[in-house]
Amino acid sequence: MKIDLERINAYMDRVEQSETTTFKPVGSKLKVGLDLGTAYIVLVVLDEEDNPVACEKQAASVLRDGVVIDYSGALRIVRELKAKLEERLGVELINCAIAMPAGTESSARTHQYVAEGAGFEVTEILDEPTAANSVYRIEDGVVVDIGGGTTGLAILKDGKVVQIEDEPTGGTHLTLVLAGNYHIPFAEAEQIKQDYTRHREILPVVKAVIEKMSSIVSRYIDKDNVDTIYLCGGTCCLTGIEGIFQREIGIETVKPQNPFLVTPAGIAMNCKL
Ligand SMILES: Nc1ncnc2c1ncn2[C@@H]1O[C@H](COP(=O)(O)OP(=O)(O)OP(=O)(O)O)[C@@H](O)[C@H]1O
Ligand SMILES: [Mg+2]
């Protein structure tokens, strides 16, 4: 069974809107998801029925390979984002879910300290690709979350996660290759990469890195039993990335219109009230 891309696009559209618009929640309890990423720290607020309410994000480099390397920096940003949301909502946010890349479970405690230090009560800890699948609801297939520094993978069978993996590759590598090719600083390359009008031009430059990512992902996929790869994560915003995956691996590869906030929204869905 294929996922309902229309439902997912509509939902993710609403999550994106909640960055600037504060939606009225159904019920009185709010769910929060904290995504401590290598490139972005994101807080998503949902109501009891998982409707998006508000979202705040901040570019940050306080993690490496999914592990917090700048604890006080992470804490400060989460505090700031929480305060912004509370100001927008007029209530205090308490419960929150957190997630980590597969294989970094030992750093769960640090993630939890960051959340608790910012004033949250952590009610659920899960892995990132599983969180992403809370939005996708895939029964059989593979979810690939390509972030800034890491690529996470979840293999689903009959609606259950049977395998999770994490590889240290992501959008930062694409930016480095662009910077090298154009002889420009990293920050400038990052800006170009996020500019949709330049995606056609840069795709051939970063193609080899994406092919490498595809071959890494390919290793984990049982081609006789998987018919679709579902992409998410900020790096998958890159126009045409799904085509490269599909050609390299030989399996249909799809992504929603905006794959950026899938994992943070999925983390929030798992917040216990
Ligand atoms: N429009 C865009 N086009 C291409 N890449 C983009 C775009 N927007 C964001 N990115 C890239 O997405 C990456 C960040 O994605 P995401 O927020 O999913 O990562 P993260 O969760 O912080 O990192 P990780 O999961 O590796 O810890 C960055 O490398 C950024 O450059
Ligand atoms: Mg991520």
Image (spheres, helix red, strand yellow):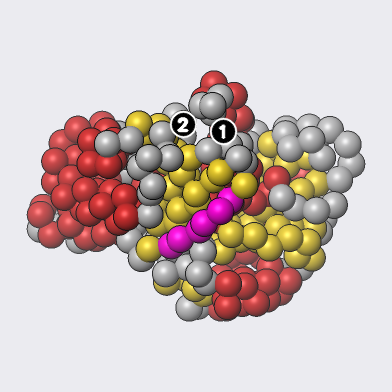
Looking at the rendered structure, the number of numbered marks drawn on it comes to: 2
Name the quadrant containing residue 115.
bottom right
Residue shown at the point (14%, 41%) measured from the top left: 204
Q: Which residues are magenta?
A: 161-166
- Residue 145's mark? none
The amino acid pointed to by label 1 is Met
Taking 34 as reference, is 137 above or below it?
above
Image coordinates of residue 168 in percent, x first then y, are 36, 65
Q: Residues within 10 Å of mark 1 (few under 14, many from 20)?
A: many
Residue ranking furthest to the front: 224
According to the picture, the residue beneath numbered tag 2 turns out to be: 256
Location of residue 226 in the rendering, given as x and y in whole percent from the top left corner: 42, 39
Is 36 placed left or right of 38 in the picture? right
**In which quadrant will I find the N terminus?**
top right
Which residue is tagged 1? 12
Disc 1 to disc 2, how far (Cα)?
Answer: 8 Å
| Residue at (45, 60) in percent of width and height | 165
In the displayed structure, does residue 13 sit left or right of residue 126? left
> Where 8 sits versus 162, above or below?
above
Assign a secondary structure to mark 2: loop
Q: Are marks 1 and 2 in contact (CB under 8 Å)?
A: yes
- Identified by mark 2, the residue type is Pro
Does residue 127 appear to the left or right of 112 in the view shown? Answer: left
Magenta highlight: main SS? strand
At a point 85% along the width and 52% down the height, the residue shown is: 273
Q: State the residue at coordinates (58%, 51%).
A: 161
